[in-house]
Amino acid sequence: MRSPDIDLTAPMNGAHATFKRVLDLDSRLFEFAAERHWPAAAPVLPRLSRSANHGVLWFAAAAAIAASRTPRARRAAARGLASLSLASLTVNTLGKRSVRRPRPELDPVPLMRRLKRQPITTSFPSGHAASAAAFATGVALESPAWGAVVAPIAFSVAASRVYTGAHFPSDVLAGAALGAGAAFAVRGMVPTRAQVASPPRPRADLPALPEGEGLVVVANTASGTADRARALRDALPKAEVVECAPEDITAEMEKAAARARVLGVCGGDGTVNTAAAVALRHRLPLAVLPGGTLNHFAYDLGVEDVRDLCRALEQGDGVRVDIGRFTSGHKRGVFVNTFSLGVYPELVRERERWSDRIGGWPAGVLAAMRVLRADRHPLEAEFEGRRRPLWLLFAGNGTYHRMGLAPARRKDLADGKLDVRVVHGGRRPALRLLAAAFAGPLTRSPAHAAVHVGRLHLTGVAPGTLLAYDGEVMEVEDEVLLEKLPEALEVYRPLT
């Protein structure tokens, strides 16, 4: 058998030639880096490279960032770790197995630079570079300030992989690109707070308060607001901060409104609800500092910490927002977030009954089990002469949107709409509520229906039925009327 003649001296053409030139350039860059003297790198980069094994360095960095105890920092740490996890999964399942490139020869690398334990996996792409870029990019997307702190460390880890001879430069570049892509993929699934913040409109003409002069802030001590109240005093020395127990909130709010130019509040959504009602009665602008567990209104507004609020107060930046109002017999109130009838108010009441005995989280679990196993529907609605059972009626102050896989948030706090959703009655309430949650933006499904209106009149609601507004619970007296008060409240918020 005769082999065909092959001219090995002929130059390669096309993609093969380009690929070979890239590999040759990569090798020359690796040798160039190995021959260079890197001042002060010897005692740092090998240790930094080892510390990043299995993501240990980045878990420690996430813990340090989260320890700053600001919501933005905690989100940045969580986003960084989520991005790192996706990048590591991609590298180990696809990258390393798709391109089985051998590690560089260590002959050009000085002995003192080499890692004590050489990696045994394939070289392309660099998992360390991918993790470093993913963590740094994820942190920066949520908090540019923390991203600027992490970026030099991430760059040093990536550089250490070439310095120690563990990777070719192209391995590191490909890993870094993959890591940054993972961070943006995570952002696509779970948007950052900046992406879901409501637009700063319509703008309100509010007084600027240099050093907080004319501001009286009432802080709910049960919300653990001591640190924030102290920070507010330091940032705005002329502001008055009143700390009080939950049972004194309403009285202290009324006293503060009588002498304040601007009414301030530090607490959770229930406390903010009380402040909003008082500010409406006294026609005062409201300054909100989040200090509770969820802080939906403040976060949707774009105020996350003392710095955000102080910037808005000192510059006089603010907006007008809608308020929801409900009336039932002689009872009436307002809500800045949500109003509901049915399962949720009963769950809240049941949780409050047990929380003092067994703690908040166990009480919540027990309440959910008891309410969802009930053999009766908490609501009935009449439509075209037929009464229909319901598990839940929800009305949001503004339209709630699902952003990727993230929970629903409001993009506009002054859209003039009540976002009304109903979960139909039937067997297995837990499954129906879960199906309604996954249905998201669908306006009608077997599990739930939704409509956007400016006013809603509910008749036939049995007296004694529980209603909840911004987490507070009371009993219905008679038919219920819900309506919007468009742009009724002026609130401080940073406009950038």
Image (cartoon, rainbow, N blue to C red):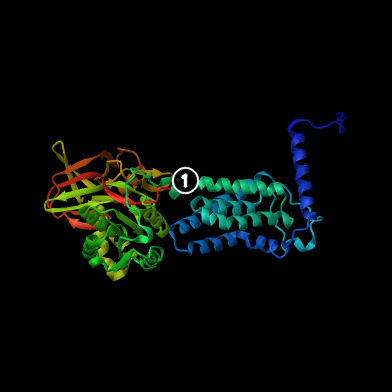
The quadrant in which the N terminus is found is: top right
Mark 1, Cα crowd under 10 Å, few <14 / some 14-19 / many 20+, is few
Residue found at the very far bottom of the displayed protein: 357
What secondary structure is marked by label 1?
A: helix
In the displayed structure, does residue 127 sit left or right of residue 185? right
Q: Residue at point 21% right, 50% down?
A: 377
Q: Looking at the picture, how far across and down is residue 328, in whole percent?
A: 14, 50
Q: Which residue is mark 1?
A: 189
425 over 44 or under it: above or below: above
Judge by depth and name the residue closer to the eye, 307 or 100: 307
36 over 101 or under it: above or below: below
In the displayed structure, does residue 458 sit left or right of residue 309? left
Q: Residue at point 50% right, 57% down?
A: 77
Judge by depth and name the residue closer to the eye, 310 or 299: 310
Q: Looking at the picture, how far across and down is residue 303, in whole percent?
A: 38, 54
Q: Looking at the picture, how far across and down is residue 470, in whole percent?
A: 27, 54
Q: Quadrant of residue 200?
A: top left
Q: Looking at the picture, how far across and down is residue 379, in whole percent?
A: 19, 49
For residue 48, say whether it is visible: yes
- Amino acid type at image mark 1: Met
